[in-house]
Amino acid sequence: MGALEIYRATRKRHDQIFNRYVMRPMAAVVVNVLSPTGVTPNQLTLLNAAIFVVGAAMLALMGDVRGGLYAVFVIELSYLFDCADGMLARHKKIASPQGHLFDFFTDELKAILLAAALGLRAWRGGGFGWDATAWPAGDVRFLLATVGVVVVVAAALSLTSFVRHPTICGEETPTAAHHESDEEQPPPSTIAGWMTHLMTFLRFLGHYPSHIWIFALWGHFEVYFWLYGALNAAYLAKGWLGLALRFGRS
């Protein structure tokens, strides 16, 4: 089986455009190379987490535009292996709930590290504040914002873990591949369609591998820092509203 067949057999339904056309085709090549070896999906998960730690440190410490681009390259390399681990598991038909949860756990750590690295970079180099005015390097407001965004991201991740728990959602952790479906779905109503498009766009904004390189080229990672914090805060508020409605009834 070649890389193209592996891609088709292990792709995911409702995936990000960046994943579908950029990362997963490259990850299929990685899987094609590694599948005859003894490398396991969990080992790839560990590798991508270690690479991300390096990328996050580079993002926080290498303050010029070139350093930011180098950091993004390392972060995207980490994400390549992040895509490959699940594809390798599905290709070898060894996907497990434990592996799925381990992958999500490392994703949680990476999300928190990203928020911290972006905030520390802004504090060290200055940039646009939340009020769209220029804040100088060393401004304590960036440090306070970093603490706040890290707390918000951690709380949002905790919320996701809670609502995905089988006791809450009523579904076991999935292990099967989520292939593209050829079945025709009924067209949604106009309002539902617009809401679907809105949620797709918001998920795209929160999916840092798709566009963090744009902020690297622009030289203003702090803009994405504020955006990342705002998206997680909105998700957290929406999630807590749902929990309040569910658990707050008499």
Image (tube, rainbow, N blue to C red):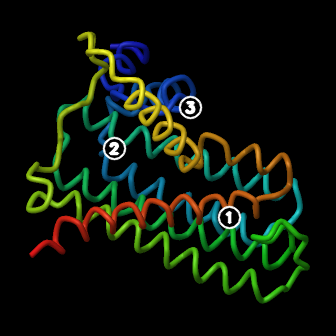
Q: Secondary structure at mark 3?
A: helix
First in sequence, mark 1 or 3: give its number.
Answer: 3
| 71 on left or right of 185 | right
Residue 39, disc:
2
Q: Amino acid at mark 2?
A: Val
1 or 3: mark nearer the eye: 1
What's the distance in space between the residues labelled 1 and 3, CA to CA? 22 Å
Rendered position, 174 above or below 162: above
Q: Amino acid at mark 1?
A: Trp
Rendered position, 187 above or below 33: above
Q: Which residue bears the numbered disc 3?
A: 18
Observer-nearest of 223 and 241: 241
- List x then y, in percent, for residue 177: 24, 31
Q: Secondary structure at mark 2?
A: loop
What's the distance in space between the residues labelled 2 and 1, CA to CA? 38 Å
> Residue placed at 66% from the left, 80% from the top?
145
Observer-nearest of 181 and 37: 181
Quick one: quadrant of the C terminus?
bottom left
Rendered position, 34 above or below 188: below
